Amino acid sequence: MGVKVIEHGEAAVEKFIRGIKVVDQMVGDTLGPAGRNRIIARKYRSPIVTNDGVTVARNIVLDDEMEDMAAQVLVEIAMKTNETVGDGTTTSVVAGAGLALGTFERLKKDNEFSAMNGGNISPITYAKEIWKQLPVALELLSSQRIEVEGDLLDKVIATSLENLEYGKILGDVFRQIGPDGYISTEDNWGTKYGIDTEVITGMRFLGTYASAYLANGKNKKEACWEDALVLVTNERIDSMRTFKSVFEEMKKADKKKLVVIGGYSENTNPFSTEVISNISRAIQAAAAGGVPKPDGSVMEVFEVLLVKAPTLRSEELQDVAVFCDAHFFDAKLKDSIRNCKFDQFGSVRKIVVNEDDVNIIGGRGNTAERIELLKKQMDDEKDPMFAEKTKRRIASLAAGMAIIRVGAPTEQERTYLKYKLEDAVNAAKAAMEEGVVPGAGIALKNVADELGEDNILYPALIAPYERIRANAGVEDMEVPDTIVDPHKVVRLALTNACSAAAALISADGGISDRRETLFDSFANKMTKMNVVKDDFRDDENQDLGRGRGL
């Protein structure tokens, strides 16, 4: 076990305060439309320029152990706010730092007064008062809330992006994809500056046609079929005999077009070479008008599009089946398409398959029940990565997905815009959930004015407004009605700020591992190498050396 650094009392508290002030300055100065940017170095890559609060916060590491521990408490609330709503990280840090510093100062003055009367006030008293006053403040905050209607969503996005034009563009995207929609932000590596949006009107997933011969588009790199039956399976299809009952059922219903979506199997390809070759020849024959029989008639040909999606697991294939109103043939349950009945077919209005992905438009399935099930799974999911994946599945089932591509001349500016866009997207989602309140710190300032300066939460409530005003360099701000913040973001920012401040003010000592200096690192390496300091000369030579020196 390494050497510990232990500090207690006023010396430790002073270091806590210094650590809090560093984070408050570095993060707080980025708040508002006049907020400054920070340049953050990255190993083996060019630095990034950003005013994203959580990005700045998570890169802060201080030399002094005690100062750094206090700083990391504030960093943690920024990360927690980001994890929960994806926006409001800077507000949470500024409010938390304001409350902690204000309460430390108040505690010091009260203790000086109490000391003259032979008493002492425990910081735990102040921590309890914070939790007592928080519900009151949240209630006053909630009273300012209004629901998102009309173009109010555009204003939320414009406030976050500080760009009215982008606010309108993204507002239109959100109205198209709906409340369960999913937005992905990507780099636009072209020369175009700004943002491009693409709304996906159906279900999209990674996949491609099993053979280039199945492509029927003008450029021969796309297969586009309309009004087709659909089968979804994770069964490895090795032989054309597997399709016997499938074709019989199609013949009874007088159907010719079929799409078979094959997902993950033990092999990388869900279809054997024999099946792919036979189906490809049949498609070519259909395009040529059929294959003549010896008696001169034309052979009946079913048109089958084989789609391979080896990255899709059983759960995701079930999503596809639900979207298409198809039965999912699960090989793990010995459920084979060899026994297919017509009511197990799904159907789609249109399916477009290219070399990279599959887009299904006009699925006939009722997805509401499946979406509710996935929402429950997402709420119970502890791993953020799997929760995000489930969110994408929900959006895909709801046929509400969009891609925003960000273009800029340099990587720094492109990264800067991406961070802003991600915050704006999260702000819009939060606004649709709980409505909005006046922006630019006005909502919290209104609560502060209502509670008064003597209230313990006053420093937290007034800090965001004061910091935005200070960054803008004005004595008084005129904030238009178009500037709004999501109620959920402000509520969680204040709650997390109180949590961090209560933890910080209740501590007056710390224990940390001592940081290894460059000298410590060198000494440890020398010890491990078992190097003994010596001039590598025997006693006789040493004596001779001394003699020469006389």
Image (tube, rainbow, N blue to C red):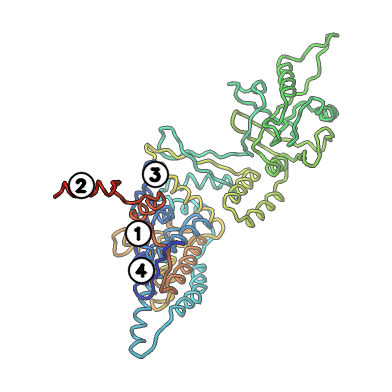
Q: Does 87 sit left or right of 306 as displayed? A: left
The residue positioned 32% from the left and 51% from the top of the image is 533
Quadrant in the rendering for residue 25: bottom left
Q: Does 107 sit left or right of 248 as displayed? A: left
Numbered badge on residue 545: 2
Numbered badge on residue 43: 3
Identify the amino acid type marked 1.
Answer: Asp
Q: Point out the frontmost of discs 2 and 1.
A: 2
C-alpha separation, residue under disc 2 versus residue under disc 3? 50 Å
Q: Point out the frontmost of discs 4 and 3.
A: 3
Q: Point out the frontmost of discs 2 and 3.
A: 2
C-alpha separation, residue under disc 2 versus residue under disc 1? 47 Å
Name the residue beneath numbered marker 4. Answer: 17
Identify the amino acid type marked 4.
Answer: Ile
Q: Point out the frontmost of discs 1 and 4.
A: 1
Marks 2 and 3 in Cβ contact (< 8 Å): no
Among the two numbered marks 2 and 1 on one chain, the one whose residue lies closer to the N terminus: 1
- Badge 1 marks a residue whose secondary structure is loop
Image: 255 above or below 481: above
